[in-house]
Amino acid sequence: MSINIQEIIKEYQSKIGDTGSTNVQVALLTARIRHLTKHFKTHKKDHHSRRGLLHLVSQRKKLLTYLRGNNKTAYSKLISHLELRK
């Protein structure tokens, strides 16, 4: 399984050419985190990649904290669309 980056960017961009906004970054990180989570179901002892996963989760958390502070409506819409919190 590979991550289709272009589809994710098209779905979450606010305007054409927007690849670095917080929404796009969080969506891409979420896709990578989900991909690595599936990887760990079969490769339980891959501790080097697990360290990378923890870094991605930390980076996503920082971006979500920033988004929550600056734009609460975009934050709540993104959280519900990505199904991150219940």
Image (spheres, rainbow, N blue to C red):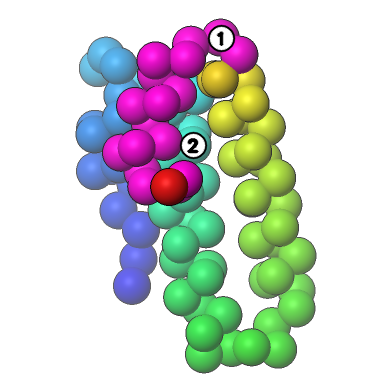
Mark 2 or 1: the one toward you = 1
Taking the view exactly as shown, the residue that stands out farthest to the front is 86
- Determine if the magenta segment contains residue 83: yes
Q: Locate residue 38, reporting x and y percent.
A: 46, 75
> Residue placed at 71% from the left, 58% from the top?
54
Residue 28 seen by the camera: no
| Marks 2,1: beta carbons within 8 A | no
- Determine if the magenta segment contains residue 50: no
Work out how far the residue at label 2 is from the one at label 1, CA to CA, in angstroms.
15 Å
Using the image, determine if residue 12 lies above or below residue 50.
Answer: above
- Indicate which disc, 2 or 1, sits on the residue closer to the N terminus: 2
Please name the predominant secondary structure of the magenta segment in the image. Answer: helix
> Mark 2, residues whose alpha carbon is within 10 Å: few (<14), some, or many (≥20)?
many
The magenta segment is 69-85
- What's the amino acid at mark 2? Val
Residue linked to disc 1: 70
Using the image, determine if residue 11 lies above or below residue 72.
Answer: below
> Residue placed at 30% from the left, 16% from the top?
14
> Residue placed at 39% from the left, 18% from the top?
74
Residue 8 seen by the camera: yes
> Where on the picture, by quarter, is residue 68?
top right
Residue linked to disc 2: 26
Q: Secondary structure at mark 1?
A: helix
Nearer to us in this view, 60 or 19: 60
- What's the amino acid at mark 1? Asn
Question: Would residue 37 appear left or right of 86 to someone viewing this image?
Answer: right
Q: Quadrant of the N terminus?
A: bottom left
> Where on the picture, by quarter, is residue 28?
top left
Q: Secondary structure at mark 2?
A: helix
Question: Would residue 16 appear left or right of 19 to someone viewing this image?
Answer: left
> Residue placed at 68% from the left, 71% from the top?
49
